[in-house]
Amino acid sequence: MVVVTLQREKCIGCNYCVEMAPAQFQMSKKDGKTVLMHATEKKGFHTLKSPDNTIFDSCEQAQKACPVKIITTKMI
């Protein structure tokens, strides 16, 4: 299982995550910040738990590309 976490409030809208993992991230037209698709939100953290291990590499690339380091990706 892949767990991806996003601290959306700290997003600066650089769009790197969308370029690296377009199936998991999209930019909001309302505020220009990224949205982690199919995630649940709790205390400012948006978390996606996916049984699809094939998304790990692209989400990890998004994590590495993020200039403000607000994305974490792990395999459990």
Image (tube, rainbow, N blue to C red):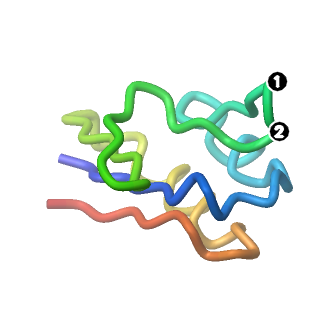
Residue contact between numbered discs 1 and 2, judged by CB atoms under 8 Å = yes
Query: Residue 45's image quarter?
Result: bottom left
SS category of the residue bearing label 2? loop
Q: Nearer the viewer, residue 59 or 67?
A: 67
Gap in Å between the C-alphas at discs 1 and 2? 6 Å
SS category of the residue bearing label 1? loop
On the image, the x and y values in percent for residue 13 come to 82, 51
In the visual, does 52 lie left or right of 51?
Answer: right
The disc at residue 50 is none
Amino acid identity at mark 2: Gly
Residue found 50% across the figure and 62% down from its top: 60
On the image, the x and y values in percent for residue 3 come to 28, 52
Residue found 49% across the figure and 28% down from its top: 37
Q: Nearer the viewer, residue 50 or 45?
A: 45
Query: Residue 51's image quarter?
Result: top left
On the image, the x and y values in percent for residue 11 come to 70, 58
Q: Which residue is mark 2?
A: 32
Residue found 80% across the figure and 36% down from its top: 31
In the visual, does 73 lie left or right of 64?
Answer: left
Q: Which residue is mark 1?
A: 29
Amino acid identity at mark 1: Lys
Residue found 51% across the figure and 60% down from its top: 7
Neighbor class of circle 2 (other Cα within 10 Å; few <14, some 14-19, many 20+) is: some
Query: Residue 63's image quarter?
Result: bottom right
State whether residue 21 is above or below residue 57. above
In the visual, does 46 lie left or right of 30?
Answer: left
Give the position of the C terminus as an image quadrant.
Answer: bottom left
Neighbor class of circle 1 (other Cα within 10 Å; few <14, some 14-19, many 20+) is: few
On the image, the x and y values in percent for residue 57 come to 48, 55
Q: Nearer the viewer, residue 45 or 75?
A: 45
